[in-house]
Amino acid sequence: MTAGDKSDLSPVFLEALASAGYAVVSVNYRLAPQFKFPAQIEDVKCAIRYLRAKASSYDLNGSEMFAFGTSVGGELVALAALTGPHSAFDVGPYATEPSNLTAVADLFGPANLTQGASGFSSPSDIQQVFGTNDHRNLVLASPTHFVAPNSPPILLIQGVDDTLVLKSQSIELYRDLKAAGDQTQLVLVQNMGHMFVQVGSNPLSPSLPQIAKDIVSFFDNERKV
């Protein structure tokens, strides 16, 4: 939540989605420590509302919107999906537009920030992002906290060798979603650390292009038009 830019979007995902007929928007959000959480999810929600408000201008189908993100981006799209069309995170412009999503792909995003396995274990890091070490803030930033029946479908992609956001995070969210009766899939990628880093001499399995295809297929299954 302290670094990153919309230009970081991998062309592998951009090309796979665009080739399948998706208009792709890469979103910037305010960064900590200057802007504390929940500024980040507020900005993501606002971006969704903006796109719905401007759908006719950009020739978009505002009734069907999908999102994917890596690391904290994955956490944020999961939060956006699980908190529904109108939530406490929906502040700012375009308030009459809903911020719900049709489906999302969460790639190795922190799921339960109250656990060290999420990567949010250092008190100084937590202070930097939230401005306080109040446990309640970690809960409110955790997708697991918002799991409920009838949530949008969520695809989870997780590297088994990730040492920053451990695979137990994605597994926990997957099990919570299944227990709620929600549609979800979990893809465990062999030989992959955080942010698609190859661990060892063997290639990622599934490969990065295959992961992109899996995201497109998951989204396609939810498209009505």
Image: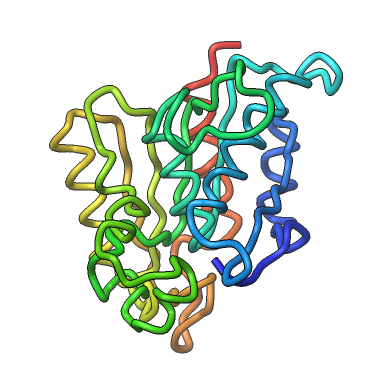
Q: How is the image coloured?
A: rainbow
Name the residue rendered at 70%, 53% in the picture: 28
Residue 34 screen position, x and y as percent: 63, 68
Residue 187 screen position, x and y as percent: 36, 53
Name the residue rendered at 33%, 50% in the picture: 140
Instruction: Specify the farthest residue to the bottom.
Output: 200
Q: Quadrant of the N terminus?
A: bottom right
Snapshot quadrant of residue 158: bottom left
In the image, residue 143 sits, relative to residue 195, either above or below, namely: above
In the image, residue 144 sits, relative to residue 205, either above or below, namely: above
Horizontal side, residue 188 vs residue 65: left or right: left
Horizontal side, residue 10 vs residue 148: left or right: right
Residue 176 screen position, x and y as percent: 18, 44
Horizontal side, residue 167 vs residue 4: left or right: left
In the image, residue 178 sits, relative to residue 200, either above or below, namely: above
Asked whether 146 or 216 is in front, the reply is 146
Residue 96 screen position, x and y as percent: 61, 16
